[in-house]
Image (tube, rainbow, N blue to C red):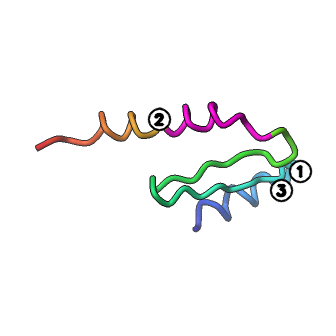
Amino acid sequence: MYWQGALHELCKATDIDLLFIDIRRRSLTVVVNAALPVPAAEQIHASIAAVEYSRSVERPTG
């Protein structure tokens, strides 16, 4: 994906090692700094829930 390459290039200049976690069932990609501890499962689930909520309120119904 274009945005992943662009983000990787941007972070390479600052020595940030990116890790992309693709969640296909949700059409979502989580990006973390691989040099830091991976967030707890609860934090990842909370982030996914926030994205799904945001998607639901931004979509018109009907």
Give the secondary structure at mark 1: loop
The residue that appears at 58% across and 68% down in the rendered structure is: 1
Q: Quadrant of residue 44?
A: top right
Earlier in the chain: of badge 3 and badge 2, it is: 3
Q: Are marks 3 and 2 in contact (CB under 8 Å)?
A: no
* Amino acid residing under circle 2: Ala
* Residue annotated with mark 2: 49
Residue 2 among those drawn in magenta: no
Residue 6 in the image: state x and y as whole percent: 67, 60
Q: Quadrant of residue 43?
A: top right
* Amino acid residing under circle 1: Asp
Give the secondary structure at mark 2: helix
What type of secondary structure mainly makes up the magenta span? Answer: helix
Q: Is residue 25 left or right of residue 56?
A: right
Residue 45 among those drawn in magenta: yes
Span highlighted in magenta in the image: 38-48
Name the residue at the front extreme.
41
Q: Is residue 11 above or below residue 4?
A: above
- The label shown at residue 1 is none
Q: CA distance from mark 3 to mark 2?
A: 29 Å
Give the secondary structure at mark 3: helix
* Residue annotated with mark 1: 15
Quadrant, the C terminus = top left
Q: Residues within 10 Å of mark 2 (few under 14, many from 20)?
A: few
Name the residue at the left extreme.
62
Q: CA distance from mark 1 to mark 2?
A: 30 Å
